[in-house]
Image (cartoon, helix red, strand yellow):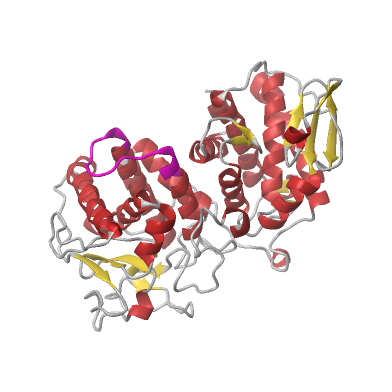
Amino acid sequence: MHRCSPRTLVTACAIAFTLLTSACGSGDSGSSSASRSVDDTPRTDDDTPRSDEDEPRTDDNEPSGDTTDVGTPTDCGDEDHDEIVCDALESVQSFWIDAYPEVFGDDYQPIEGGFHPYTSESDQPPCGDPPPSYDDIAQNAFYCPSADLIAWDNENLIPQLFERFGPFTLGIVFAHEFGHAIQARADFEAPTVIEENQADCYAGAWVGAVADGTVPNFEVTAEDLDLAIAGFLTLADVPGTSERDPLAHGSAFDRVNAFQDGIDNGAAECAGYTLDTVVITQMEFTVEEQANQGNLPLDETIEFVIVDLEEFWATAFPEEFDAEWVPISNFVPYDGEVDALTCGGTDVDPEFALDNVWYCLADDYIAWDEPGLFVPVIDQIGDFAVGMLIANQYARAAGIRLGIEEFDAATLLQIDCLSGAWAGNAAHRDPDEGLTLSAGDLDEAIVAFLVFGSASDPGVDSGNTAFERVDAFRQGFLDGIQTCLS
């Protein structure tokens, strides 16, 4: 976020490392992070794309099972992750047997080329002539259109994903790869970023079916969905990647948005994805942003965010609620290790104040532990994460000004949604009209939700999951204030 020009921050592996794979922050583009592909072409270690249409479409962090049977997989292997992969393939195929006729009006055609686990010592998947080497497709899973097969690295990728993210993520990965197979069957063609977002949406549709209990082998928990959000951070494009890049897969926000869209609305919604119907927030850095990746110093971040939030709510209150916005009375940075604070004449619990940001209703001020919270957040996540922490307190104050007397799980999700409405306003305004967003800012918001989990204020458990909070934020971002209130 930046006054009068777009900006962004680097993604934060340091804070969220326990949720993310080692792919986050790796400099090896061929063996980690999001898959990058052009048609059927894997991204190589030197970032040089290849162009043979008979080579595989690659998607990092996408596993599968062990079979050449075109129906239900058999001979799954001896490892725990092999059995999970086999269950995933069966479950996703079961989903599409039912969903494909409903969405496309025709029978689902099974994968003809089979399912191919591979290692550095095995024969490689028969995709292309000659097939790709292991180095070309290490740490990958992919759908190969020319051979109509799904393949995956069963030496490194799948065991690592299983260990770090658990079994359900393997199901999501395979549901994504099946999404590419569905695109081939439906003759779907679009820029890569739309294809990848649609495959994420199809994966979400499968998750929705799991939640409904209509497909076999899996159940989904809140923890599974939080881990899925973390996984999308490892799959996201590097901030600053153009959506027009033929290898673009989308920002973390875009991919999570598509995934949650599929969960909420099903495969038929995903099938309608086009450049005109999908919101792509991914953008490039401007020339002036390249040097510092769009980061502002903390003092400027706080100043610009407060000014912008005051302007946002001063405009929103009369337009949306026919009421006048009363500006926040004061802002109180403090050192949680040293300073004692009061709110309404009562001492604030030092444990509550430590590493926290909060709104004092009695005295109408927003306070934050600057060295304990804001400094590490801006250093390890980015300036927009700080902006979101302040925006949440503004939204809380707005809710109180509108008559909310008690904050429970539901109303705290409204607060996240209202923060998303502010972010959406900043994203779509003219750069000359105030604070604007740029590459990576929305991904930073997702990292912040994961880091603070259910905490509307850091350290204060709201009972909401990170997945629910991201969902509320994106709804406000996409649809504005009135969606939050309904």
The vertical placement of 270 against 316, above or below, is below
Residue 222 lies in the magenta stretch? yes
Tell me where the magenta segment starts and ends, as one range.
Answer: 211-225
The vertical placement of 373 against 48, above or below, is above
Residue 318 placement, left or right of 190: right
Q: Name the foreground residue: 407 vs 327.
A: 407
Residue 81 visible in rendering: yes
Residue 19 percent coordinates (x, y): 51, 53
Residue 165 placement, left or right of 2: left
Name of the residue lying farthest toward the bottom: 130
Q: Residue at x 70, y 59 (%)?
A: 294
Residue 263 percent coordinates (x, y): 37, 39
Q: Name the foreground residue: 299 vs 40.
A: 299
Residue 218 lies in the magenta stretch? yes
Residue 197 percent coordinates (x, y): 41, 53
The vertical placement of 439 against 50, above or below, is above
Q: Residue at x 49, y 36 (%)?
A: 468
Residue 75 percent coordinates (x, y): 15, 62
Residue 112 placement, left or right of 189: left
Residue 430 visible in rendering: no
Q: Name the foreground residue: 199 vs 173.
A: 173
What main secondary structure does the magenta stretch of the protein show?
loop
Q: Residue at x 23, y 70 (%)?
A: 146
Residue 17 placement, left or right of 375: left
**How many discs appear?**
0
